[in-house]
Image: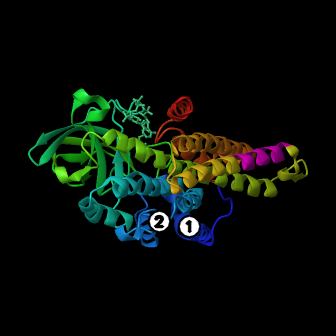
Amino acid sequence: MKFDLTEEQLMIQQTAREFAETEIAPSSVERDKNSEFPFEIVKKMGELGFMGMMVSPEYGGAGMDTISYVLAMIEISKVDASVGVIMSVNNSLVCWGLEHYGSDYIKQKYLVPLAKGEKLGAFALSEPEAGSDATHQMTTADKDGDHYILNGMKNWITNGTTADYYLVVAQTDKSKGHKGITTFLVEKGTEGFTHGIKEDKLGIKSSDTCSLSFTNCRVPKENIIGEEGKGFNFAMATLNGGRIGIASQAIGIAEASLQAAVNYSKQRKAFGTEIANHQAIQFKLADMAVKVDAAKLLTLQAASLKDQHKNYVKESAMAKLYASKIAVENALEAIQIHGGYGYVREYLVERYLRDAKITEIYEGTSEIQKIVIARMLLQ
Ligand code: CAA
């Protein structure tokens, strides 16, 4: 793995940083307070190529590598982790799968507008009774001529109310267990497909999350992604890359916490000097900085393996496991350094903690990441 970033990667990082600071930061507090989706920001991100970063230009994408995607995700999430997850889901959970498993029809009709940011995507695997135990799918898809009829519920769907296209995982043959699972692309507005109300969440409040409901929803067979019966493997392969995106989101939060702690400790005085001069604070800052860099190295390692088309299952799980853990730890330390001010909304650090927690849960909990890592070690 090379440690130096290329000119192009540095340019993407800089563009994302400037965009985050000028276009995202000014509205982030209000959007968090009002649980408001960043429609205008997502539109502009699409125009800049941030919604289909790794998709080939042939299909409307920016044709960049995974390392560039990690760098951009960190910059965006440093300023607003809600925008980070919206970007991550569209890039890693939707566009990636369509480009690698979709038919030419699917790519032309759906991937192109998704990669350009003209449409938004969502990934619907989780169900009320199938979260970590993802093979336990209850949503069914019964063949009826040239269509499949979907019935069931999906839960915790990021971009749930705002997406245009949804990747929906369903059982086409229950007798075959996970080998009877198939993934479909379902368009918003299809008869029999509705979404629930937005969840009132602890954090990432500017992103929207909701349940989906399918009642005799007819989906044409052309909308199968990959092959019938391979939908679970598709979902798992997709999540491997998704975990790199969430690790990057977590690093953004951890780095923002560190920066806030450094800035505050240089201003706040106690015992006759800036608190940055006290070893108690210096030790905390040093620990926070080491954690950010360790998480970055793990995540860039996973991204680099992915770019080289090598196996990155273990490395992406490690990156997500560690980055999400230290995002929570750094946010907590930033609050501790801010004292009482850290506990109120006037400073951003309380949001960092609220936003960090979900990174230990979605796209595979920390416990699931450990299972994935251990299985790779033992195979
Ligand atoms: N990569 C590729 N393939 C994988 C895989 C991975 N990481 N994990 C499992 N598979 C494959 C296996 O090789 C196996 O394939 P074959 O039968 O063809 O050999 C198949 O999947 C079944 O695997 P297992 O027998 O290991 O299945 P399991 O029931 O024991 O559980 C699990 C596997 C790892 C626990 C899996 O269920 C899992 O990852 N669960 C967590 C699901 C998850 O991450 N959900 C997040 C929801 S999405 C979300 O949060 C999106 C959002 O909106 C932000």
Q: Amino acid at mark 1?
A: Ala
Q: Where ligand 1 lies, by image quadrant?
A: top left
In the rendered view, does 146 fall on the left or right side of 185? Answer: left
| Highlighted magenta segment, given as a residue range | 280-291
Name the residue rendered at 57%, 71% in the picture. 15
Q: In the picture shown, does residue 40 fall above or below 217?
A: below
User: Which part of the image, by quadrant, shows the N terminus?
Assistant: bottom right
The image shows residue 249 at horizontal and vertical percentages of 55, 52
Q: Which residue is mark 1?
A: 16
**Is residue 76 or residue 293 the one in the foreground?**
293
The image shows residue 19 at horizontal and vertical percentages of 55, 69
Name the residue rendered at 41%, 66% in the picture. 56
Q: Are marks 1 and 2 in contact (CB under 8 Å)?
A: yes
Q: Is residue 347 visible?
A: no
Among numbered discs 1 and 2, the one appearing first in the sequence: 1
Which of the numbered marks, if any, corresponds to residue 369? none
Which of the numbered marks, if any, corresponds to residue 50? 2
Q: In the picture shown, does residue 133 fall above or below 124?
A: above
In the rendered view, does 77 fall on the left or right side of 1? Answer: left
